Image (tube, rainbow, N blue to C red):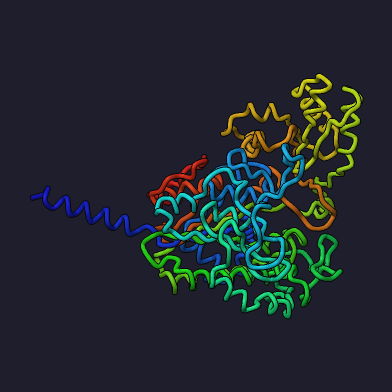
Amino acid sequence: MKRILFLPLLFTILSVSAQQKPKLIVGIIVDQMRQEYLYRFNEKFSDHGFKKLINEGYMYKNAHFNYVPTYTAPGHASVYTGTTPAIHGVIGNSWYDKESKQNIYCAHDESESTVGSNSDNGHMSPRNLLTTTIGDELRFSTQMRSKVIGLSIKDRGAIFPAGHTGEAFWYDKDTGDFISSTYYSEQLPEWVKEFNNQNKAENYLTQTWEPSANLDTYIESINDENEYEDGVGKDKATFPYPMKKDGYWMVPATPFGNEILTDISLAAIKNTSLGEDDITDLLAISFSSTDYVGHGFGPNSKEVEDTYIKLDKNIATIIETLDDEVGKGNYLIFLTADHAVAEVPQLLIDSKVPAGYFDKKQLDKLNEAIEAKYGKGDWIENVSNNQIFLNRKTIASNNQNLIEIQNFVADHLLLAKGVARSYPAHLINSIDYDAGGVKGLMARGYNQKRSGDVIVELEPGWMIRSSKGSTHGSAYTYDTHVPMIWYGAGVPVGESVNYHPITDIAPTLSMLLDIKLPNGATGQPLTELLK
């Protein structure tokens, strides 16, 4: 009798388990978001945006990118592939191509054309991404019945999350419309055409970026008028910021960029049948305006604070729409970033904290130093992304040893002011992929075919930039430490302070969905979410 009851009970349990798979995965990447913003701006957030995700979801307080360089394109690729540039191949936003001897943009593809406008901003594809994404594996597991859509202001913020088999749409700064590429389709879907017909960008260009509250209440930031910020559309970097009617580029440079991305995200949720059946879909949303504002004003500015206060409302709107359209308990959200950001060095200097600006002129004499030891010649082929590319032909024609010259260049660079360490490629290649410390970060960010001969890391607080605004890209925690929050279907409430690399996101989704891991994945599932 017990055996007769056991089989139906087991069948019921398995059926319930299968039904618990979310109908929709929503991946949200906030470009350049620090983990500490969740604490610093917490009192300014409503109960329906970031706080809702934190209080009703699971937050990993010690999530990091586990490689360098910490840039936008590698960040998006790593989140959705579950691996690092060493394997997925996206080593920067652009990089020097050793074969063509040219700098190439990460998503540029001259074989494809723009769909949705007459601009050149759609010559794009994900072909430089060498591995599958979680979206690709989701599509393969359902024989392409799952819908996978990537949306962003930036092309790379939409393309890499959408993977090789999804759809991607991004903002065209020339027209104010959302466009795509012939890689995906010969024409825009009707819902995107209808969205573009609303002329949202035109509307935002008639408005003024005003703070959400009295600036005196923005006590989490430095004075609005200071010496550390660039302006947006005007010389003085202080509120308010009137938009320019003919400046479609201004929309992404302000919180209005997050507004228009929210608008098209809602349109996607309402018009593409996402999450309407039992076949799981994926919507990847990447907010880019936080990055533009962060670069121009720095992480301690009132402009950044106001941008996150406004973004909190955007997040709340997306959650509310998902509740209405997909249903509570039917969707799962993960929110993270593609990298964080450094302090403005000049602000640190003025606060008596060690920091500085690296003078690139120090690299101008590098070829001279090699010539002094090895003879005349064009020894340096390219310098980019804190990497030195040596001229292999010159080395061969002079009967010199590549490893010896790599070592010489690495040693010579240590003499430059602001350089903390430099490593020759042969050393990086010998380091175990799972190694700790900065060397491990470099090994995981180094792609043997695409990366250079010598990698340079500056001192903490140093950057290659003007004295205003900030940037990112380093191995330090101010660039690697980002949010990781899970919310929705089957997610327990809680938090963890254990270290987790961002590459754990895709493998976790694979386990939750019972699908194959992305084919280059190196991350591990987050066990707290799978209990």
Residue in the image at 40% along x and 64% along y: 330
Relative to the observer, which residue lies in front, 140 or 383? 140
Quadrant location of residue 304? bottom right
Quadrant location of residue 491? bottom left
Relative to the observer, which residue lies in front, 313 or 242? 242
Left of 262 or right of it: where is 474?
A: right
Residue in the image at 84% along x and 53% along y: 466
Determine if residue 500 is in view.
no
Residue 146: x and y in percent read: 43, 58
Left of 48 or right of it: where is 368?
A: right
Determine if residue 284 is in view.
yes
Residue 345: x and y in percent read: 80, 51
Residue 134: x and y in percent read: 49, 50
Q: In this picture, is 327 found above or below 376?
A: below
Left of 316 or right of it: where is 508?
A: left
Q: In this picture, is 43 found above or below 338?
A: below
Residue in the image at 84% along x and 44% along y: 358
Q: In this picture, is 379 found above or below 47?
A: above
Residue 299: x and y in percent read: 72, 59
Q: In this picture, is 433 found above or below 205?
A: above
